Image (cartoon, rainbow, N blue to C red):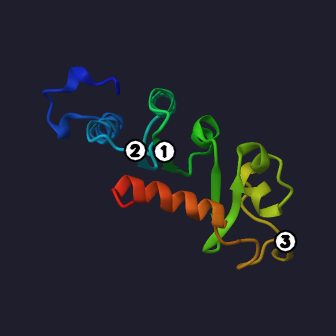
Amino acid sequence: LVGISEKADVYPGQLSGGQKQRVAIARALAGGANILLCDEPTSGLDPISAARMDELLLGMKAQHPDMTIVSVSHDMASVKAIADHVIVLRDGGIGYEGDLAGLANSDDPYLRRFMDRTPSAPAQEDGPGQGGYPLSEQSRALMHEALDAWLGRN
């Protein structure tokens, strides 16, 4: 499924970064995980390998519709390719929560800079501590429900 069966007899030190990430995904699948947590799944990968990782995650999503995939990423190209729901963290809280279209169409100055990769803004536009909001109760409940199910706590 993860495309590295030819590496079954290879030592971990002989695998590339992308291959190691694929092995980690295979281990999660072999363990029957209902939630897959991906921390920067495209980090350190060249653009072609990153696109393959996105393809792999999309394929897993299609083959395992009951699995929840949570990906933490700074790679906006990957986020745009794989995300259904996006949370942007800001100032210790949530700067945005919703779908990609809402994020892309936001008129919030910080989110515009975030999406456009613009380095700075006037101080009055985006001071520290402004703009973040706590996780919605609905999202908090869904996260807790999914984690409880994953951990076998019902």
The answer to which image quadrant residue 6 occupies is top left
Q: Residue furthest front?
A: 154
Indicate the secondary structure of the residue bearing disc 3.
helix
Q: Which mark is residue 125?
A: 3
Closest to the observer: 134 or 121? 134
Residue for point 84% across, 71% down: 125
Amino acid carrying label 1: it is Thr
> Badges 2 and 1: C-beta atoms under 8 Å apart?
yes
Amino acid carrying label 2: it is Asn
Mark 1, residue position: 68
Label 3 – label 1 distance at C-alpha: 36 Å
Indicate the secondary structure of the residue bearing disc 2.
loop
Q: Earlier in the sequence, mark 2 or mark 3?
A: 2
Residue for point 71% across, 79% down: 129
Report the side of 36 relative to 79 (left or right).
left
Mark 2, residue position: 34
Q: Which of marks 3 and 1 is nearer the N terminus?
A: 1
Residue for point 64% across, 51% down: 86
Report the mark closest to the observer, 2 or 3: 2
Amino acid carrying label 3: it is Glu
